[in-house]
Image (cartoon, rainbow, N blue to C red):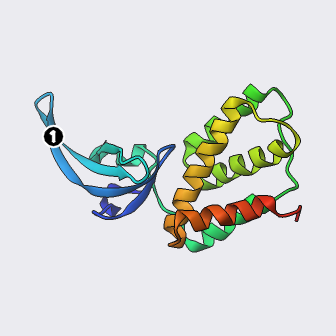
Amino acid sequence: MSSMDLKVGDMVVYPAQGVARVEGLEEKVISDVPMRFYVLRVLDSDKKIMVPEKKIDDVDIRRVITEDEVDEVFDILRERNVSFDHGTWNRRYRAYIEKIKTGSIFEIAEVLRDLNLIKVDKNLSFGERKMLDTARRLLIQELSVAMGNAEEEVEKELESVFNAKSA
């Protein structure tokens, strides 16, 4: 996304933080150099993130997904014919961390799906449970904005995907 595309009020996804609203452009002087920063406000934590205008393309910020992409996310979540890394939980955990850090909703959907499927057969480690919660939170937040639905509705829809018998 080029910095020219961002306007106040735009909704964007900041990797591993979630959906944020562009609140404005501020100028600050750092080491005697005036710099312009995009001010982003993360929706669920109210965290304020300032991204240098010149670095916006380096941060992997992206727009919230489209309706077509929402369908793709649910297709990923419904997939049951999945092979897992049956190695140690910490190796799986590191791989899932990397997927979440990408900020890709499709990668996050895979993490949520995989952990939900693993959970059926065995207990998740503490780290995996936290990861499951993070993936669920990021997914619910973005799907809610993309679909124009309340987060509670999206959460119920996700629960029905995982409570359904194998497709």
Tell me residue 12's x, y (percent): 42, 58
Kind of residue at badge 1: Lys
Relative to 54, residue 97 above or below: above
Image side of residue 130 versus residue 39, left or right:
right
Tell me residue 16's x, y (percent): 51, 43
Q: Quadrant of residue 50?
A: top left
Q: Quadrant of the N terminus?
A: bottom left
Nearest the viewer among 43 and 61 is 43
Tell me residue 77's x, y (percent): 74, 59
Tell me residue 4's x, y (percent): 30, 60
Nearest the viewer among 148 and 4 is 148
Task: Residue 51: tell me if it is visible.
Answer: yes
Image side of residue 162 versus residue 50, left or right:
right
Q: How many C-alpha atoms fall within 10 Å of the one at disc 1: few (<14), some, or many (≥20)?
A: few
Q: For the residue labelled by badge 1, is the local secondary structure a helix, a strand or a loop?
A: strand
x 85%, y 37%: residue: 122
Q: Residue furthest left?
A: 32
Q: Quadrant of residue 132?
A: top right
Which residue position holds label 1? 28
x 36%, y 58%: residue: 21
x 67%, y 31%: residue: 127
Image side of residue 83 versus residue 21, left or right:
right
Count of numbered badges drawn on the protein: 1
Task: Residue 94: tell me if it is visible.
Answer: no
x 62%, y 61%: residue: 155
Q: Quadrant of the C terminus?
A: bottom right
Nearest the viewer among 39 and 147 is 147
